[in-house]
Amino acid sequence: MTESLPLFVVVGNVNQGKSSVVAALTEDEAVPIDSYPGTTQRAAEYVFRGGDRELFRIVDTPGFQRARQVLARLSARAKNAAERPAAVRDFVVDPAMQVEFPDEVELLRPILAAAGILYVVDASSPVEPANEAEMEILRWTGQPAMALLNRTRARDHGAEWRPVLNQFFHLVREARSPGAR
């Protein structure tokens, strides 16, 4: 039955609150959450249930580690926009890329299984060039995507994030992690 369920993949940089978002969306206390980076090392799928019914699947992924380098590799594989989704697929199945960029391959693999993307950013940190590379890589997949502004600390850079996110995503929403003040 899970094959026909909607699939969403939660992605973003390390330590942005991705696993906390997954735990909240699935109401699953078994989702591993910790304050140190790198807690999620492998993609893990969870199912949201409404009573006895399975309603959707959601995949928690490791964070982007080297998005700018990955985007450079992808750019060398695609001459134009029409070739970009194929370049991402080729990147994911390339054994050399699996060794060199294991986290990025791990997070892109479930997206290529026709998943919707939920890109989580920590709005308590400023936008960095690597974040723009992450968003561009996600755009290259051709999959539907939305962004979620999360805050893991009291600082607020949301006003800086919104215009950047609006360039890459049609939907931008805000959340607050339990640990934020």
Image (cartoon, helix red, strand yellow):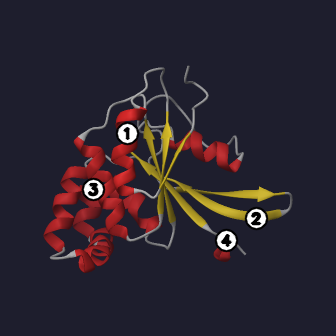
Identify the residue under disc 3.
Answer: 101
Question: Comparing marks 3 and 1, which lies closer to the viewer?
Answer: 1
Q: Answer with mark 3 or mark 2, whichever residue precedes in sequence.
A: 2
The residues tagged by marks 4 and 2 sit, at their Cα atoms, a distance apart of 8 Å
The quarter of the rendered structure image containing the C terminus is: top right
Q: Secondary structure at mark 1?
A: helix
**Is residue 89 rendered to the left or right of residue 61?**
left
Percent across and percent down for residue 117 are 48, 60
Residue drawn at the location 41% of the way across and 39% of the way down: 38
- Residue at x-position 18% and y-position 74%: 78
Quadrant where the N terminus is found in the figure: bottom right
- The residue beneath circle 1 is 161
Residue at 57% from the left image edge and 38% from the top image edge = 175
Of labels 1 and 4, the one closer to you: 1
| The quarter of the displayed image where residue 109 is located | bottom left
Give the amino acid type for the residue marked by disc 2 in the picture.
Glu
The residue at 48%/20% (across/down) is 154
Q: Position of residue 163 (x, y in %)?
A: 36, 44
Q: Earlier in the sequence, mark 1 or mark 4?
A: 4
Mark 2: give few (<14), some (14-19) or many (20+) Cα within 10 Å: some
Of residues 149 and 83, the one nearer the viewer is 149
Badge 2 is on which residue?
A: 54
Q: Nearer the viewer, mark 2 or mark 1?
A: 1
Examine the rendered structure and indicate whether residue 63 appears above or below residue 144: above
